[in-house]
Amino acid sequence: MKLDFKTAMFAMATLATPTLTQAADFLSIGSCPVTCTAYTWSAGIADVINKNVEGVQATAEETKGYVANIALMQGGELEASMATSLSAYEAWAGTGNYEGTEPGKIMAWMSIAPVAMHIIALEGGPVNSVADLKGKRVGMGQPGGVSMLDANVLMAKIAGEDFEPFRVRLGDMVDMLSDGNIDAALWNGSFPLAPVIKLNAQRDLKLIPVEDDFFDALRADYPPYFRLSIPGGTYEDVTADTPTFGLANGLVISADVPEERVYQMTKAVFENLEALAGVHPAFGKMSADTILNGFGSPLHPGALRYYREINVPGIEEFVARTGG
């Protein structure tokens, strides 16, 4: 880690243990502001690593969020971070929002929880299908947020530039939708979304389904997107499952972290999911069946080694698909 206070700690540590290296000693995990879920996840994972992997000092770092995390990793200021799987893919490939950056530096590590694209509209309004978003007033999410990046991808596929974007946070979007100031709101997040529950208590709500043909075309351009549904009953007015697409909230890690170190850390996290579920319930839903969800970039060799060892379903297909 290159932050000043950690550099000082490293200097002191090397006086006592000169055979250790900085990369082996410190693992900084970028998250988000301390009030958000990703910080809780990072802190829990750091604690498990510190208790179970000898020679590592892991810390959860408060950051401005996922977009900032990738930039900090690219600058060498973090060894690992929370990210969406789309950001992870684009950062690894040096494409999209990270075009022009060095590819191959940031690798997939583990998926924690899915986020689902919500296309939110009101009964009786002008939006009844994905195609209806063309030419409409659309809430997109606030600048700098990953949800806005996903909304940009969706709207570019649907409408090019033929729509009126409103780039505000989710709470403001649902108020604007309720007041008739926008026609639809887009948000990629873990369900249920509290502001949408609030909206549903005030207005007749509907979620717009994403049909198979549209999803297939979208995923052809953006491999990290995967198919999922928002279950019926998640929101009171929406009684049927709503097919949509999502990403994963997960961890990425620098390719520079040694393979053996990543193997030991991956093993520690996976063998302590029950304890981590006491930190946040998302860990209670993690398993060998979910650990790869949404990733389109190659796994770090240390993580790949462990996942092969425990026979993660589809691991060889994943390697073939990602070129890892």
Image (cartoon, rainbow, N blue to C red):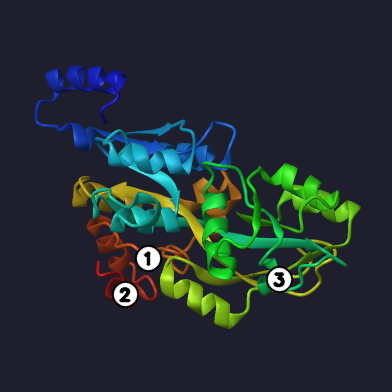
User: Which residue occupies 15% across, 33% down?
Assistant: 21
User: Which residue occupies 50% across, 36% down?
Assistant: 32
Q: Quick one: quadrant of the N terminus? A: top left
**Above or below: residue 137 compared with residue 288:** above
Q: Left or right of 163: which side holds 240?
A: right
Q: How far apart are the two marked residues, 3 and 1, measured between alpha carbons?
A: 29 Å
Neighbourhood count class around disc 3 (C-alpha, 10 Å): few under 14, some 14–19, many 20 upward: some
Sequence order check, earlier mark of 3 and 2: 3
Disc 3: which residue: 132
Residue 144 shows which numbered tag? none
Q: Circle 1 — which element? A: loop
* Contact (Cβ within 8 Å) of mark 3 with mark 2: no
- The residue sitting at the left extreme is 19
Task: Give amino acid for label 3.
Answer: Asp
Task: Give amino acid for label 2.
Answer: Arg
Q: Is residue 259 visible?
A: yes
Q: How far apart are the two marked residues, 2 and 1, measured between alpha carbons?
A: 8 Å
Neighbourhood count class around disc 2 (C-alpha, 10 Å): few under 14, some 14–19, many 20 upward: few
Nearest-to-viewer mark from 3 and 1? 3
Residue 296 shows which numbered tag? 1
Determine which quarter of the picture holds residue 12.
Answer: top left
Task: Give amino acid for label 1.
Answer: Gly
Q: Left or right of 15: which side holds 147?
A: right
Q: Left or right of 144: which side holds 303?
A: left
**Above or below: residue 60 compared with residue 5:** below
Disc 2: which residue: 321
Q: Is residue 49 visible?
A: no
Q: Circle 2 — which element? A: helix
Residue 13 at what x, y percent from top left?
19, 21
User: Which residue occupies 32% across, 36% down?
Assistant: 78
**Foreground of the two, 182 or 287:** 182
